Image (cartoon, rainbow, N blue to C red):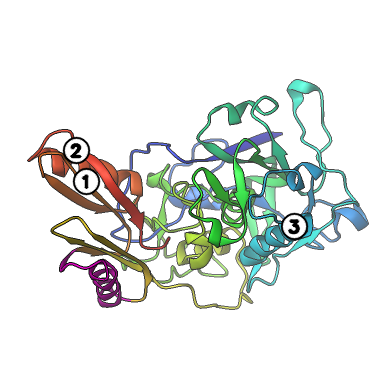
Amino acid sequence: MRFIQLCLGILCLLLFGGIEADAFVVEGPKEKAPSAKAHLDRAPRWGLSAGSLVDAGERGLGGGLEYAVDDSVCQMRFVDGSTCLEIKAALQDALDRWASGHPSLRFVDVTGQVDPAFPLAALGTSAQGAEIDFFGSAPEAFPPFQNTSITGYALFYERPQASLVLTNGQIAKGPIGRIESADVRFNTSYCFYIDPLFDALDNCVHFPSLVLHEVSHALGIGHPEEAVQFNLDSDQVRGNEIKIDCLAPSEGLVVMPDYDGAAVAHGQDVQGPGRWRRGLTWDDVAARDALYPHCGIRRMERASAEWGAFALSADGNMGQATLAGSPREAEERALEICEDQGAPCRLVSSFDNCFAFASAPDGAIGHAKASRSDHARVDAVLACSEVGEACQIVVDFCAYE
């Protein structure tokens, strides 16, 4: 049995960026595929099954993907006072977002019927628990969390198959991995919250957003910023729908190393509720539908690109706007917020990705926008350093936050 492990970090510095067009990527086969299309065609995924795990002992999409929530999840520190029922409801809401509009994909809570388990050969354990298990884990008990930047961790377990019947009824030629179970862990050294009003708390994680991201991995979807040579798109138009042929999902797709920085599957900046507010992007939906094609999928409008803006006055007053529907709306709002503080302001930038502003004691300033906030921060400091010394970031934020 092969297992794939994926993590979500806060400060992971990755090599690739860019958002000239949108694209998605899936977790690939065990053996490196010769092309991006082969990477998709042979990617591991959940298979069809006649019955459910609880009723028939069968692992697969039959009866829905059955999940169990370990007691440790409700024992995590929720600073907004969320109850266990509210925590489980938020988790189900995140799962439902991934299932929305898809005839073959749904999630069923079997907590109390199946005990969560974490198969780990090194410890001599083989029980797989439910099809998806959710745990809260401390760093001392789960070594990956000793990396303090990692807030969540997902693993899935697959077995190679000679062929697999896809959700569209077509047969995929193997070798292809059939996912049997997945485990999602949350780092209990962090504080969590559900209510976005608590977003201002430092070092706390918006739980629904984290679940939304980790479930992408449990379905077999990867971080689009990590293996850009396998990213796929259907055109070079930014922010639009990626067309997936329901009978031949890899047909019509082309390699596109760029991606949407606001995609749920993106491994950066998903600690706050920005992506939760925005919902699944066209990239996320395309990845799901490419792995689980079906001609009966109900098309749903995705959230359009959000716009942000930053304004500044001569004496240092600032105005920030996010989640605007157009550049003009963002600019007007940022200027209004800035000038409400009592001085004339100028617009510095509007953007539909991430922005950072840096300054130095000698008065030098620099700003930048990029697909990821860490890229914007680096670029802003570099821009400021071209004309000043000891530049530091003053503010950075993303339009979709």
Choose mark 2 or mark 3, whichever is in front: 2
Q: Which mark is residue 173?
A: none
Quadrant where the N terminus sits is top right
Above/below status of 168 relative to 56: below
Q: Are marks 3 and 1 in contact (CB under 8 Å)?
A: no
Q: Is residue 17 left or right of residue 150?
A: left
Distance from label 3 to label 1 (Cα)?
41 Å
Quadrant of residue 189 in the image? top right
Q: Are marks 2 and 1 in contact (CB under 8 Å)?
A: yes
The residue to which callout 2 is attached is: 391
Disc 2 residue type?
A: Cys
Choose mark 3 or mark 1, whichever is in front: 1
Describe the element under mark 1 as helix, strand or loop: strand
Farthest residue, direction front? 342
On the question of residue 10 being in view, the answer is yes
Describe the element under mark 2 as helix, strand or loop: loop
Residue 91 at x, y percent in the picture: 69, 57
The residue to which callout 1 is attached is: 358
The crowd level at tag 3 (other Cα within 10 Å; few <14, some 14-19, many 20+) is some
**Magenta residue span:** 326-347
Above/below status of 203 relative to 63: above
Quadrant where the C terminus sits is bottom left
